[in-house]
Image (cartoon, rainbow, N blue to C red):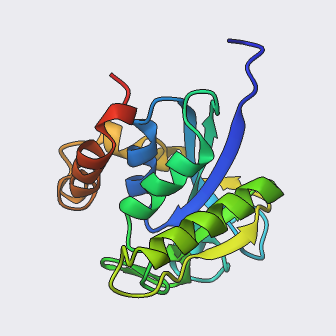
Amino acid sequence: MSDQKFELATFANGCFWCTEAVFQRLQGVVEVKSGFTGGNIKNPPYREVVMGRTGHAEAIQIKYNPEIVDYKTLLYVFFSTHDPTTLNRQGYDVGEQYRSEIFYHAASQKEIAKSVINELEAENTFEDKIVTQLSEASDFYTAEEEHQNFYNNFTENRYCQLIIEPKLATLRKKFSHQLKS
């Protein structure tokens, strides 16, 4: 597997603790990093991002094997496990740092994302219009170590139980065939 070609996907869809936990469980996902992207300062610290001072979004960067899980499936998981119809908000988290945004790494990812958004809109999947932004991937800054693997390290934490666990339940219900054993 050392000569395997992996690809990157970068998504912002609320708190990265939640989104990291979701994508870590998918077959074909090799690595998920929590971090920041889409803003205007280099190497932003968590504290500045969550205060809304940097323009960055909390995001995850996924390294995946496209022979096992394709980009379109990652997008379906992305749209199924957050609310893409709320501008700059996910649940209790409010501010542009919690926006819904897809950072594409290639023109093909941009086209696939547009196609999935159009499909979801045509099917009226959500009551409201999807506000997810599409942007070209820019520098991704990995968050501090205490933010990595958060759910797995603190499963019993109240936040994990109240906020992350329902997202994982949705993942198990809708994508059980895609989960790691």
The residue lying toward the viewer, choosing from 122 and 112, is 122
Is 29 situated above or below 96?
above
Nearer to us in this view, 110 or 157: 110
User: Horizontally, is 43 left or right of 90 in the view?
Assistant: right
Q: Quadrant of the C terminus?
A: top left
Q: Residue at x 43, y 36 (%)?
A: 26
As drawn, which residue projects farthest toward the front? 122
Q: How many marks?
A: 0
Residue 101: image x %, image y %?
59, 71
Position of 41 compared to 92: left or right?
A: right
Q: Residue at x 26, y 42 (%)?
A: 172
Left or right of 140: which side holds 102? Answer: left
Position of the N terminus, as image quadrant, is top right
Identify which residue is drawn at 62% across, 77% down: 133
Can the viewer see residue 105 in this picture?
A: no
The residue located at (38%, 79%) in the rendering is 124
Q: Give residue 10's position: percent from left, percent from top.
A: 64, 55
Q: Residue 61 in the image: state x and y as whole percent.
A: 62, 49
- Decide if residue 64 is in sight here: yes
Picture coordinates of residue 87, whole percent (x, y): 48, 87
Taking the image as shown, residue 172 lies to the left or right of residue 36, namely left
